[in-house]
Image: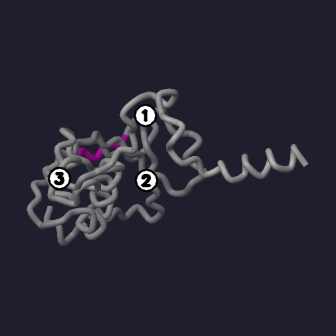
Amino acid sequence: MSLERLPGFRNCLIDDEASIQIQLKFLIDESRQRLIQGTLQALVHVSCQRCLKPLAIELADDVKLVLIENEDAIASLDTGWDPWICADHKLELAGLVDEQLMLCMPIVNLHSSGDCLAGVNYNTGAKDGPLDARTESSENPFSVLKALKENNATN
């Protein structure tokens, strides 16, 4: 499937170099429920949210959908199956694939090695020693309030 047919997923990527493989089976079970079962795999390029440089990631997802007519039918679904509302028995396959690919994207895209930290001079906020080892000479934003409180106590 081309990326032009997947506009939502395409907006998550930094380029059009993507390899997407989709295998879906369409079934009807013994209770006459319409099912879609299969796998999605993709190799895509996204932006690292730490250093903003390109990052290649692999996506993989198992698809287990039950086509339902309305939200009322969600309560009767077997566990392990996700609902897909399809009221008029017509299914736009590209829309389904687009949404499933977006759902399997990581919440945050980062280089796994952390090498990009040095390149952007990222400060993690960690101090050289434990909190108790900090010197009193470091400025305390509440030192002025402490001085005022001591002055009021002596007056």
Q: Residues within 10 Å of mark 3 (few under 14, many from 20)?
A: few
Q: Which residue is mark 2?
A: 84
User: Which numbered mark, 1 or 3, is in the foreground of this view?
Assistant: 3
* Residue 58: x %, y % from top left: 17, 45
The residues tagged by marks 1 and 3 sit, at their Cα atoms, a distance apart of 43 Å
Q: Which residues are magenta?
A: 24-28
Check whether the beta carbons of the residues at disc 1 and disc 3 lie within 8 A of each other.
no
User: Which numbered mark, 2 or 3, is in the foreground of this view?
Assistant: 3
The kind of residue tagged 1 is Gly
The dot on residue 145 is: none
* Residue 125: x %, y % from top left: 40, 44
Residue at image position (14%, 66%) is 15
Q: Nearer the viewer, residue 133 or 14?
A: 133
* Residue 21: x %, y % from top left: 13, 50
Inspect the magenta stretch and tell me whether residue 4 lies in it.
Answer: no
* Residue 99: x %, y % from top left: 34, 58
Q: Nearer the viewer, residue 6 or 35?
A: 6
